[in-house]
Image (cartoon, rainbow, N blue to C red):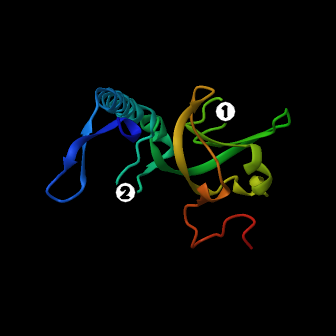
Amino acid sequence: MGARGCETKAGKGETGNVDLVWSNSMQSATLLVTIALTVVATTVPAQVPRYPAHELIVPDSAAKDHLDEMVTVEGTVVSIEVSEAAPSRVFLHFGAPPPNQTFSVLIVGPVLPRSPNLQEWRGKRVRVTGLVRLEEGRPTIRLTKPSQLRGAAWYVFPAPGSS
């Protein structure tokens, strides 16, 4: 038996190259790899967020209809909730103050120090892009980078901290 589970024929083929023949162990290994890749390929799409073909912009009141989707949510920040507990968390609430908010943005972890002047967003019309998930029972986008949050009318007012 040749290297890597292949056998050679007794002679050379018409091209002068050594012809390889699949051994039973190679066929079994190939079959197992094919089955494993098929199983992975059929289960992975269910775990991956759906990305729209174009940027989908929805009002904050409709965010609940786009759970597990990558969208841009637009609305006015009506209140800001800062948690002093570790780890620090900041919620930007839309629609109404808690517990009646229609949508929230969660800023936590390493993004928080890179997001100065969050209080300046209160009363501003903004857009936030990301994966909509339920957080504390409300549709929420968790920021992973500050650039996900921007003014909806950036040509009218600059993003806080950009001056």
Q: Secondary structure at mark 2?
A: loop
Left or right, 62 with respect to 25, comes to: right
Tell me the residue at 76%/56% (across/down).
114
Residue 80 point in image, percent of width and height: 73, 44
Q: Residue furthest front?
A: 10
Tell me the residue at 46%/48% (across/down).
71
Q: Quadrant of the C terminus?
A: bottom right
**Residue in the foreground of this view, choosing between 153 and 144:** 144
For badge 1, the amino acid type reads: Pro
Task: Please tell me how crowded label 2 is: few (under 14), some (14-19), or many (20+) other residues with Cα within 10 Å.
Answer: few
Residue 4 point in image, percent of width and height: 40, 39
Tell me the residue at 81%/36% (across/down).
87
Q: Secondary structure at mark 1?
A: loop
Kindly identify which numbered label has been placed on residue 98: 1
Residue 2 point in image, percent of width and height: 36, 39
What residue sits right under mark 2 in the picture?
A: 54
Quarter where residue 162 is shown: bottom right
Quarter where residue 115 is shown: bottom right
